[in-house]
Amino acid sequence: MPEFEVGSNRRTRRLLRSESDRDDRGWTLLHMHALKGDLKEVKRLLDEGMDVNVAAWGPKSHGITPLHLAAKGGHLKIMDELLERGADIDARTKGACGWTPLHNAAKERKKKAIRFLVENGAFLPDSISDARFNPPLHYCPGLEWAYEELRRLQSDNSSSGETSSSSVSDN
């Protein structure tokens, strides 16, 4: 596998060649390209056999997956590709309530990503204040939008009797 130099910031990152190679955050190339929204590289890495659910373990990366990072960046095409390849839509990080990709999208106020995840079956507990599954709202200000989307989707489904479909566009 060819070597790739990752990062153009001041911190020097070692060369990453495989899934076992990680940067100082515990991220693989798949994590980095998912966050950047680089669909071509994400597909290439997955085609080469990288695990779609690879979790990053580092000082600030407690089990974050490429889907968490794609949701954080609002990259719908990446999210769609990852889900098509078997990504866990409800993957939880290690911690008090365990953040999901939906929480990451909500924290960054990525409305289209929130809608996409809700329409594709992301779990939401009945109550927005359920601390077992949701972070406090001051950490995740867009979570209200997720509940609005869930209500809209439930209303649309009950009135039409059909499942809503979402078009995938990052714009």
Image (tube, rainbow, N blue to C red):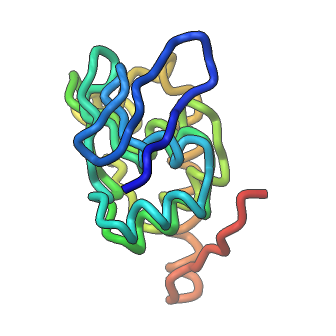
Using the image, determine if residue 57 lies above or below residue 111.
above
- At 40% across and 21% down in the image, what residue appears? 136
Side of 103 where 75 appears, left or right: right
Residue 156 in percent (x, y) is at 59, 75
Using the image, determine if residue 84 lies above or below residue 82.
below
Residue 165 appears in the figure:
yes
Side of 128 where 34 appears, left or right: right
Residue 169 in percent (x, y) is at 71, 66
Toward the bottom, the furthest residue is 161
Looking at the image, which is closer to me, 101 or 123? 101
Q: Locate the C terminus and report the quarter of the image it occupies.
A: bottom right
- At 31% across and 69% down in the image, what residue appears? 86
Toward the top, the furthest residue is 10
Toward the front, the furthest residue is 2
Toward the right, the furthest residue is 171
Q: Locate the N terminus and report the quarter of the image it occupies.
A: bottom left
Looking at the image, which is closer to me, 150 or 12? 12
Q: Quadrant of residue 168?
A: bottom right
Side of 47 where 35 appears, left or right: right
Using the image, determine if residue 92 lies above or below residue 53.
above
Report the label total. 0
- At 52% across and 88% down in the image, what residue appears? 162
Q: Quadrant of residue 115?
A: bottom right
Residue 155 in percent (x, y) is at 55, 70
Residue 119 appears in the figure:
no
